Amino acid sequence: SYELTQPPSLSVSPGQTANITCSGHKLGDKYACWYQQKPGQSPVLVIYQDTKRPSGIPERFSGSNSGNTATLTISGTQAMDEADYYCQAWGNSLNWVFGGGTKLTVL
Amino acid sequence: EVQLVESGGGLVQPGGSLRLSCAASGFAFSSFAMGWVRQAPGKGLEWVSTISVTGGTTYYADSVKGRLTISRDNSEDTLYLRMSGLRVDDTAIYYCAKVGVSYEAFDAWGQGTMVAVSS
């Protein structure tokens, strides 16, 4: 079965750039998207189709996907961005698959 | 505003059955595929199932195939998940989610309903 691998945790200082990676075999041939989940809340889509931001998502969130790695970049990270982030892939005969999640700490 | 409201969760014994419902509003329900995603306590997200706009095509994770059945009623704007042969490892929050136009992402989520399987 297809697997997506994320680092379990990442720490950044406020104002710095956070790069959260997601690795999978030929992931660049599929669509990748990203979700933010804060404690006790439902997930929120922050990036879809590799690079697109849904309405209402701040511009500091961006995405890329090439080769075997998709990356969620948060520029000028703020305290409110502290959350769990999940990548998810679909396409090219692949059903929906989630990565294990990355806990982002802003300190 | 898109709203998805799940119901039907609860405590059930191993081998038991439940039916989850998801009432949708604020969008053209019959025009979008829908899905279920679950999250075991303290764990990550796991895709469970997706259904096409008409209900004619369904997809399942290997872990639930043959035990969980997704369906929809477009006249009632409601999504369902029939669960049977429940196991302890099915214990999770079950989220109803709307599939976006690009089909690969879930662009709206409900608040979730808890299913606990225990003797």
Image (cartoon, rainbow, N blue to C red):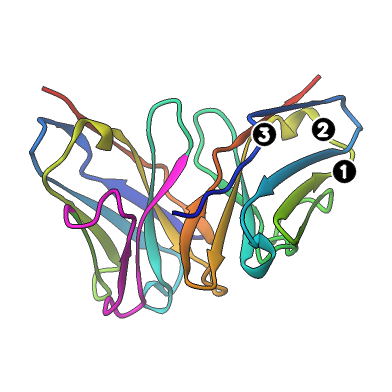
Separation of residues labelled 3 and 2 (CA atoms)? 20 Å
Residue A97 sits inside the magenta stretch: no
Separation of residues labelled 1 and 2 (CA atoms)? 9 Å
* In-image side of A53 versus A73 (left or right): left
* In-image side of B71 versus B48 (left or right): left
Residue B58 sits inside the magenta stretch: yes
Q: Chain of mark 2?
A: A
Q: Which mark is residue A75?
A: 1
Residue at image mark 2: A78
Amino acid type, callout 1: Ser
Q: Residues within 10 Å of mark 2 (few under 14, many from 20)?
A: some
Kindly indicate whether the residue at mark 2 contacts the one at mark 3 (C-beta within 8 angstroms): no
> Which circle, 3 or 2, is nearer the viewer?
3
At x 48%, y 36%, the residue is: B44
At x 31%, y 48%, the residue is: B6
Quarter of the picture holding the N terminus of chain A: bottom left
Q: Chain of mark 1?
A: A
